[in-house]
Image (cartoon, coloured by chain):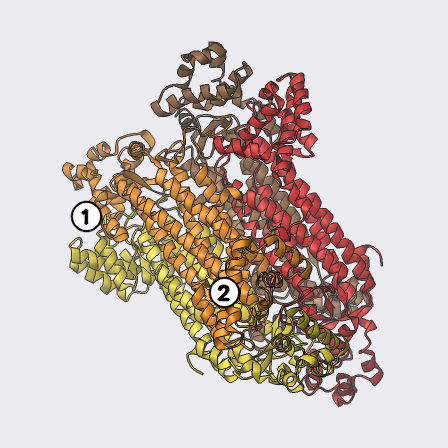
Chain colours: A red, B brown, C yellow, D orange
Amino acid sequence: MIPRYSRPEMVALWSPETKFRIWFEIEAHACDALAEIGIIPQEAARTIWEKGGSAEFDVARIDEIERETKHDVIAFLTHLAEIVGPDARFVHQGMTSSDVLDTCFNVQLARASDLLLSDVDGLLAALKERAFEHKDTITIGRSHGIHAEPTTFGVKLAQAYAEFDRCRSRLVAAREEIATCAISGAVGTFANIDPRVEEHVAEKMGLKPEPVSTQVVPRDRHAMFFATLGVVASSIERLAIEIRHLQRTEVLEAEEYFSPGQKGSSAMPHKRNPVLTENLTGLARMVRSYALPAMENVALWHERDISHSSVERMIGPDATITLDFALARLTNVVEKLVVYPDNMLKNMNKFSGLVHSQRVLLALTQAGVSREDSYRLVQRNAMKVWEKGKDFLEELLSDEDVRAALPEDVIREKFDLGYHTKHVDTIFRRVFGAV
Amino acid sequence: MIPRYSRPEMVALWSPETKFRIWFEIEAHACDALAEIGIIPQEAARTIWEKGGSAEFDVARIDEIERETKHDVIAFLTHLAEIVGPDARFVHQGMTSSDVLDTCFNVQLARASDLLLSDVDGLLAALKERAFEHKDTITIGRSHGIHAEPTTFGVKLAQAYAEFDRCRSRLVAAREEIATCAISGAVGTFANIDPRVEEHVAEKMGLKPEPVSTQVVPRDRHAMFFATLGVVASSIERLAIEIRHLQRTEVLEAEEYFSPGQKGSSAMPHKRNPVLTENLTGLARMVRSYALPAMENVALWHERDISHSSVERMIGPDATITLDFALARLTNVVEKLVVYPDNMLKNMNKFSGLVHSQRVLLALTQAGVSREDSYRLVQRNAMKVWEKGKDFLEELLSDEDVRAALPEDVIREKFDLGYHTKHVDTIFRRVFGAV
Amino acid sequence: MIPRYSRPEMVALWSPETKFRIWFEIEAHACDALAEIGIIPQEAARTIWEKGGSAEFDVARIDEIERETKHDVIAFLTHLAEIVGPDARFVHQGMTSSDVLDTCFNVQLARASDLLLSDVDGLLAALKERAFEHKDTITIGRSHGIHAEPTTFGVKLAQAYAEFDRCRSRLVAAREEIATCAISGAVGTFANIDPRVEEHVAEKMGLKPEPVSTQVVPRDRHAMFFATLGVVASSIERLAIEIRHLQRTEVLEAEEYFSPGQKGSSAMPHKRNPVLTENLTGLARMVRSYALPAMENVALWHERDISHSSVERMIGPDATITLDFALARLTNVVEKLVVYPDNMLKNMNKFSGLVHSQRVLLALTQAGVSREDSYRLVQRNAMKVWEKGKDFLEELLSDEDVRAALPEDVIREKFDLGYHTKHVDTIFRRVFGAV
Amino acid sequence: MIPRYSRPEMVALWSPETKFRIWFEIEAHACDALAEIGIIPQEAARTIWEKGGSAEFDVARIDEIERETKHDVIAFLTHLAEIVGPDARFVHQGMTSSDVLDTCFNVQLARASDLLLSDVDGLLAALKERAFEHKDTITIGRSHGIHAEPTTFGVKLAQAYAEFDRCRSRLVAAREEIATCAISGAVGTFANIDPRVEEHVAEKMGLKPEPVSTQVVPRDRHAMFFATLGVVASSIERLAIEIRHLQRTEVLEAEEYFSPGQKGSSAMPHKRNPVLTENLTGLARMVRSYALPAMENVALWHERDISHSSVERMIGPDATITLDFALARLTNVVEKLVVYPDNMLKNMNKFSGLVHSQRVLLALTQAGVSREDSYRLVQRNAMKVWEKGKDFLEELLSDEDVRAALPEDVIREKFDLGYHTKHVDTIFRRVFGAV
């Protein structure tokens, strides 16, 4: 966790204070269920809530106990006993540490998912607004970094919207994956604890009971969760790289907002570097990389080993904090993105008319020229534009073979930009449901 | 693709013959839609189906043309023209190569998903049968590779069933991710092709239209697909490692089936090595590794570049063929697994009675002994078993402090195995819906 | 292994024929040593060489035997016995299959390294030639995709040369890592085979004896090997992406060679896409991905398990064949790269004079203006160029505060390009040892 | 960075205080060179050392300035000016931020390497001591988790020693990779700074000048560095998994040291879990995962982009701190490992005599029995041991076909353990140079 790539709400979710609070809630809800079943006194359950519910757990004190016992849950329970008094002996009855640890981790991941979903909603709103703003802003579409055919900047953003909308659905599914509760004892047989305790705690903590846990929640769930974050990060990378390309000196069709006081470089004051999206590219690499140890965590030995734990202590916070930050930063970039429609047009016209070659090719074949011949005709005129800077339309109009197949007005019509934007509304309707 | 790790049906799906057949279908369906809209003659569309529908495409001939044109779709279309005749000029009208390539790739991935789903169904059936067979087969549960508490071998298999059932749902979702069709032209604007063509082809090929494609289907879909395969592979690894552990010489609770003619080693004839599950461990590493280049493929430049293509030519077949083989091999291992219930019991009793320590601990606390004291009492008797080979029950019965808290019959009752299996039916009901 | 991304020599190295030939050599050399020590008859060793040395091993026959025995080395030895006759019983004395398999794999990897080193040599030669050709070809250096200061195209290529020169050293080290021989028996104790056999075979096969093998060569060696290939692939990606950027429509400073007959796109005949370097980007992702399963292979259980085998059957050929192809393709791209020095100059002058801002800034501070003030002075003039298309030199000359600090000739001198290239020879001397 | 997986010296290396101290040294040494060349006054260089050399840089103050300028190096220089006074204007002359940042990062990585090398030395010492202690401690070698042939525990540790000795060499090479200095200006042309400054700073900071930098040190160096750490981590995983296996309840041949006060589990007091080596398994996954973003960092755009920066802010500290901690923890585990030679013998004799089957097989073939027949003879007796618990030696002695080929004393001799350890000294001599 790097402060500069972190936002407070997500950081707080991973603080010891939050963790101990969740541990307490799990234990206290379990006591309620144990009391309801008749294993422990109702009075004890009430006392535990009363004394622990409002207590501030002393992180330093718990750390101190842990240094001695080398066991975090025992350290917490010992501290809890200092707060609750004798009734504390009813806490954690028949439970094992992982019942608390794993359920807590899933609560944290579920809450982290909620923050991420809210981030994506913000990003989607920004993308939608900018997409509609630029629905008709003509720009050149590029394949292989080479001019292809016209599109609009709004369509680019609509694509990003559709992509992050898919990411949203994936995050909802990822949340579903890990929102489970396991309170099933040492190897998951409920030998020492009634399954009704798990059901009660699950309900109270907003989780579903894990069908079969084996002391631990099975880690295929977490693998799927972190793999999903990796895919979301990859989509962030895609949009970040798009913006970096658009901001290149030679392209300059869009630019990250550059605040008046900001210095781009200690040496070259004219430079406005796309540092935010470059940063996002790097952050995406990190979030993606966490998917692998999460997948390696799946194959725990027998009912469980603890190799996953150190991994998750790192990637639990790191992946969610970094992705939260990245989504928020990208939202900010999109919201404030400075767009240069004039440059878009200027760039498109760099090779005068070549972008219309596809249409001319089609017109030739439709006029009965063979595919091979049409291709050759278009190509020989296109090459004059490319190599000698000629104007494509004029070359075509003065090519006898072309003219033999197509009348002048048909050729001229092929250079109409409206032709390329006629289905933009169709696309917007598909993505946004309306135009 | 390694023949020894491949099965014919999945291999066939990735053959040039299958690919060209799918290309033809996409082109021919597109012609139907173009004819319906009135762009090309109905008669031409019919001729294309008639001549191409039953044709065997000559892969060698197409390769030959491609060597000259350096373009695979043009090579195919040229060959198709040789088969269809003059009407071939109506094929591919307004389309771009990626319309064919990407839609075909998604058809292949969707069909591959169907095979994988069928594999998982086979595995689930095998797991279910063996789980019920061993529902009550007592075995020791192990955390950290160390004996913990008793469970049953059926519960182990029920866990695996639940895990692969989740994998099944993930594969269904992954199939959904990539089952889209894109026929939208050079940069996805439908400038040269009516969106109705895409809709028609999508429906006929069992796909959904891609809301916004940009010549290519966006690769976040494929990243999610291959990441999902990586998670499934990780679950395969988990079960494979479980079996490898159970087959260890010192454990020998289960064993891969060893056919009479098989030689385990050129030098040590007594050895029966878990080579199938070791092999699965390696295959899982491979399938998992493909998730990363798939994620790196997401950030294509602008409307598209072609960097994803070489990756997908490799991981498309490799990931699906390997996972298909691995699922089938694992199914076979599970079906034929030789289980040794006697060894399970023998192992469990290795440290006489220690597995019941948790119950004794709980009984002590419930009898009013403090958590700390209970722990100490249990620990001091357990250590005698561990270090001196004493019998845990007898040590407890002769420990005055223990006896001061618990009567003999209560202590003896704590050594009843039925205590640990009383909720096995609950677990089976959760997983299988019935017992 | 994808034919289109493969070259015949590297493919042949991984053929069954090559493998069986190497197996034979290992076995036959081992027989020589065994005969020398007196374990087997000298005559037998001679016979084995005589009959086996010129034999063509029948791959189909070996496969047939393997289908029955399910063991590849036994299948080979059985076939060898069919060729050699009774003396075959002296073959493989005291050896275990892995002695043959692992030593063979290392021979293949060492030979693959030799091919890769030769590829890198070719690439270095191409880079060197083009670097000297363009030592003085002025081009703009870009940080963040934004114009920074002038450099030369030769310096760019010198950087690539230095990078691939490091890659060469890494490949030499990687070859060293895996060029070991293990003939140490079932668990590496030499119980059944004299260490002198290993020493003899090692020497004959161009390897070093593995200090401690445990039936297998330890896989940290292979992890290092494949990780190194991943780093080399990443350097390929870097140069590929550089070229892709230079070929962008708006930049067009260099271009992959486009053969007259080649078709760039079925629809847009004017397009010349950097498809080779895009392809290299994808191939780099693949080679990089193989590093991970290779690292996961390290932790074999105890003296060995066989999980690494399936991984290596895949990545052994795939990583080396793909990297060999990629290096050769990149060499070809570099050799034939079409360079446009005029466009380089045109691009550099896009924002008239702004690239000299750093020099002006420095001149101001050296003239006694504070860093802060200098920065502000440069920035305010730069912004006029950026936003209003003014000429930077003229703006500076007419800025009173600037002129108060610097005389006209000093300002003008700051716009001399020679200033930026004065150390190009220094750089070339560092990289190439001469200029 | 997780406190519980961190050691103070490595953490301190990555503190802001250390970073600013290194920045200062780079700047001050550069001033010396600039003064020597005559660019800035000698007096100024002296003042900078005098005032800055003993100054405590105020991290909070620098952060405050950075929040305004959004540029870390400018923030530092501004703060430095507050300390040094007017002469501060001579600092950073002709340099660019990356000259400081990249050289500093490499200094940190080189120092981190020194700590890691010292860690490895500690581990090697521990392994050597324990290896010699157990040079003759007989234990069963296992392939596939199945008993193979006897070896000694010392040989196991010698293997680990040899592996970490290779890791040591790799770390030395990795340190060499990144120990470079770049002070070459905005695009690496030395336009604004004399190459002699770089040479001077390099020498003073213990680095080599980077032959061609392009504002940044090329990232293939760092990719190789972090990939190497990933390989070292994989070797840690191997030894950790070995120990976890040895500590399994059924095996119990060795055990992590368990301090008297330590609690293994809140519920099962008899359990001694190999939690340290399980933890190391997880940490290894993390260190390994960092190799990938480091490789993705290589392909920076043109002369540089800043996408690598966020990655390195994370993996720079995380990878080195985690690996440092893991090496130290592993050293501790090895030093204190409790070894149970009696259990090793007991386990080896589990299947009475089967481990000698390979020797018997060899004896039979050497006695003239065909390989196939020998195999069958050994196998049929071995199966009686395996399936019916018979004694292998006795079965062989009473098998007429075996006796027809081998006299009793020869058969008995095949069960001598000394046979397997006769080359242990050879192995130790190879690894340690002496016995």
Decide which of C332, A132 is in the foreground and name it. A132
For disc 1, the chain is: D
Decide which of B91, B133 is in the foreground and name it. B133
Query: How many residues crowd mark 1 within 10 Å: few (<14), some (14–19), many (20+)?
Result: some
Tell me: residue D296, above or below residue A78: below
| SS class, disc 2 | helix
The residue sitting at 69% across, 59% down in the picture is: D68
Query: How many residues crowd mark 2 within 10 Å: few (<14), some (14–19), many (20+)?
Result: many
Q: Amino acid at mark 1?
A: Gln
Q: Amino acid at mark 2?
A: Asp
Say which quarter of the image contains residue A126. Answer: bottom right
Percent from the top left, x then y, of residue B14? 57, 59
* B384 on left or right of A429: left
Q: Which mark is residue D366?
A: 1
Say yes or no: labels 2 and 1 on the same chain.
yes
Determine the CA span between mark 2 and mark 1.
Answer: 55 Å
| SS class, disc 1 | helix
Tell me: residue D340, above or below residue D308: above
Q: Which mark is residue D220?
A: 2
* C163 on left or right of A337: left
Tell me: residue A373, above or below residue B353: below
Tell me: residue C26, above or below residue C306: below
